[in-house]
Amino acid sequence: MQYISTRGGVIGHYCDILLEGLAPNGGLAVPERMPQIDSVDLERWRHLDYADLATEVIGLFATDIPRDDLARLCRAAYDPARYASAEMVPLRDIGDGLTLVGLSEGPTLAFKDMAMQFLGEALDYVLEKTDGVLNVLGATSGDTGSAAEHALRGRDRVSVFMLSPQGRMSAFQRAQMYSLHDANVHNIAVEGVFDDCQNLVKQLAQDLDFKKAHRIGAVNSINFGRISAQIAYYVWAWLRYTDRLPEAEREGVEVSFAVPSGNFGNILSGLYAKLMGLPIRKLVLATNENNVLDEFFRTGIYRPRSAADTVATSSPSMDVSRASNLERFVFNLLGRDPHRTAATWETLADHDTFDLSAEQGRFESEFGIVSGTSTHEDRLRTIRAFFESHGVTLDPHTADGAKVAREHVEPGVPMLVLETAKPQKFADTITEALSTPIVADAETRALFDAPQRVTMLPADAEQLRALIEKSALR
Ligand SMILES: *Cc1c(COP(=O)(O)O)cnc(C)c1O
């Protein structure tokens, strides 16, 4: 399987694109064709554990990794000892026709662990083979940074330089990151907001000589390794849901998924699963007040907002106004035509908007995507409602998903809501919703008590450059 750029040209194989974010022409790496699965595959996979299922699914994309090696990587990434639930990804009915898909049982209590744990293993594997090293440089508003650090900590060939905005993350997120003392983890708290962090990363990434000299890479949400690993849990959720049905009634049963969305990474994996042949009816995209994607899917007009027009919400991991993975959807929408895709992104660069309203009817009919917005009030109300009716505490992002999911439930079609984080990570909002403080368990208290280590830095590219020069692996 080769990978091509959404704007044209061949990029390479799976192992090549793991280390490369963007294609040289600015496009994103996509598989040259979508692998297909059918009901025979699904029944063959029904009895596999999570690691073996992930091997099958990722193996359709990572054809340049020998199957035994891939199985070993997946077994390490999806070792039940790394997850809070023995089921890895448990399903739980929460009423109103909704079923929660527990993707947040990993080490940092967010769904990003599911892909990042695999990526950590895969990066090590590729670097071992090529005798290389990689210095991951990234910016985080919370979940990405901690998931990356927990996946990469203690590795010999990878180090992490993670910028976070001083005083802008939850106490839990800070503790998760800053309590890591591994020599290869560098936490850098920048004086400023998340966008200042991201701008610093961009400034350094644009300096190609610096990037090359210091082996700088990224594990952000456009990384195809993450996209491919996420497809596995859509398949898993379908299998576990249909386990409940009599054997003769399972084939082709359609389910819908509701996905709390920011950078369009998670839901893109769901779309790929659907295009591969998994029986998915609808993909319900939920946004918070930063509802650029909801606007796009309702109108076909994409109008990303500036950092200044992106509001800080109580579902902070979805505070995104420029969804980096959307280009992969548009590529499919435009018949996988790299010229039309490139032209659309040229329009975006020139006018900061593009208009695909002529195609909008196909968003749902062909791709199953519908959308909705959830506000702070919706979030609080939803958290309260599911707590009262089913004793389940949803995290604020998952609550956005559940709120929008309810608006799209169809009779007879199961609605699977992806749980993208655990509520402990966002205790303030839970407390506000339930009017009682969330009680910290022993593990959380120990995390808060652990000594923290972080380097303070002004929003200054030269100082960041100096810091990396001093500590980068070479
Ligand atoms: C990252 C994240 C999201 C958004 O996922 P995308 O793949 O960026 O759309 C939603 N919820 C939580 C808790 C997250 O950490």
Image: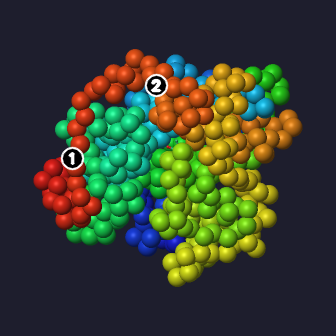
Q: Which residue is mark 2?
A: 83
Q: Quadrant of residue 239?
A: top right
With respect to residue 220, does 78 lie above or below? above
The spot of residue 35 in percent (x, y) is 61, 50
**What amino acid does circle 2 point to?**
Tyr
Disc 1, SS: strand
- Residue visible at 56% across and 68% down? 304
Disc 2, SS: loop
Q: Residue 283 got which mark?
A: none
The spot of residue 163 in percent (x, y) is 31, 51
Alpha carbon separation for disc pair 1 and 2: 30 Å
Toward the right, the furthest residue is: 411
Foreground residue, 305 or 429?
A: 429
Q: Which residue is mark 1?
A: 455
Closer to the camera: disc 1 or disc 2? Answer: 1
Toward the front, the furthest residue is: 435
